[in-house]
Image (spheres, rainbow, N blue to C red):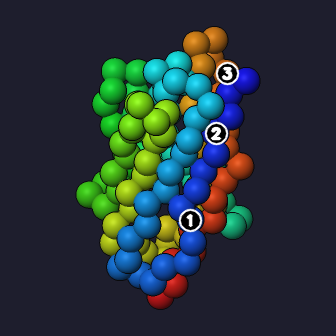
Amino acid sequence: QVQLVESGGGLVQAGGSLRLSCAASVSIFSIVPIGWYRQAPGKERELVATITSAGRPNYADSVKGRFTVSTNNAKNTVYLQMNSLRPDDTAVYYCYGTDYVGNDHWGQGTQVTVSS
């Protein structure tokens, strides 16, 4: 059973930084691609950043240059370092991973609120 548990959300002023963590119950190598989505109120869930099975990061245009996705394979954890945060980054952030048979697994989400 794959479980993903996010942490690190909170309230921050515009221009500030947060680091989100996602701890997986299985090896990260078994649930790639792995990464982050977000969903703002009244909007659809959107891809933020992901690491492909080839180990390459991909980012949404809106976060390029500000966010960095990374992993600690020994800890089965994926991170999202968020810098230069803006009010439009406010959303619930979800960790996800895709297993060998193509099933998507999601965390419970963590709230990020950026005040202006």
Q: Which mark is residue 103?
A: 3
Residue 106, given in percent of the width and then of the height, sits at 67, 39
Q: Residue furthest top?
A: 101
Give the percent coordinates (x, y) of residue 70: 36, 42
Query: Is 93 located above or below residue 77 in the figure?
Result: below
Name the kind of residue labelled 3 in the image: Asn
Q: Nearer the viewer, residue 33 or 1?
A: 1
- Which numbered disc covers residue 80? none
Asked whether residue 23 appears in the rendered view, the answer is yes
Q: Residue at x 39, y 38 (%)?
A: 71
Between the residue at mark 3 and the residue at mark 1, the CA separation in whole angstroms equals 26 Å
- In this rendering, would 70 be left or right of 10? left
Q: Which structural element holds mark 3? A: loop
Select label 2 or label 3 by which is in front: 2
Q: What residue would you read off at disc 2?
A: 4
Q: Earlier in the sequence, mark 1 or mark 2?
A: 2
Q: Residue 95: where, in percent of width, then height?
A: 58, 44
Label 2 Cα crowd, 10 Å radius (few <14 / some 14-19 / many 20+): many
The structure residue drawn at horizontal position 52% and vertical position 24%, both measured from the top left corner, is 27
Which quarter of the rendering shows the N terminus? top right
Work out whether residue 7 or residue 51 is closer to the camera in this orientation and state it: 7
Check the image and report above or below for 75 versus 11.
above
Residue situated in front as seen by the camera: 3 or 85: 3
Q: Which residue is mark 1?
A: 9
How far, Cα to Cα, is label 2 from label 3? 14 Å
Q: Are marks 2 and 3 in contact (CB under 8 Å)?
A: no
* Sooner in the amino-acid sequence: mark 3 or mark 1: 1
38 vs 78: above or below: below
Residue type, numbered disc 1: Gly
Query: How many numbered discs sit on the rendered protein?
Result: 3
- Closer to the chain start, of discs 2 and 3, is 2
Mark 3 crowd level (few <14, some 14–19, many ≥20, 10 Å Cα): few
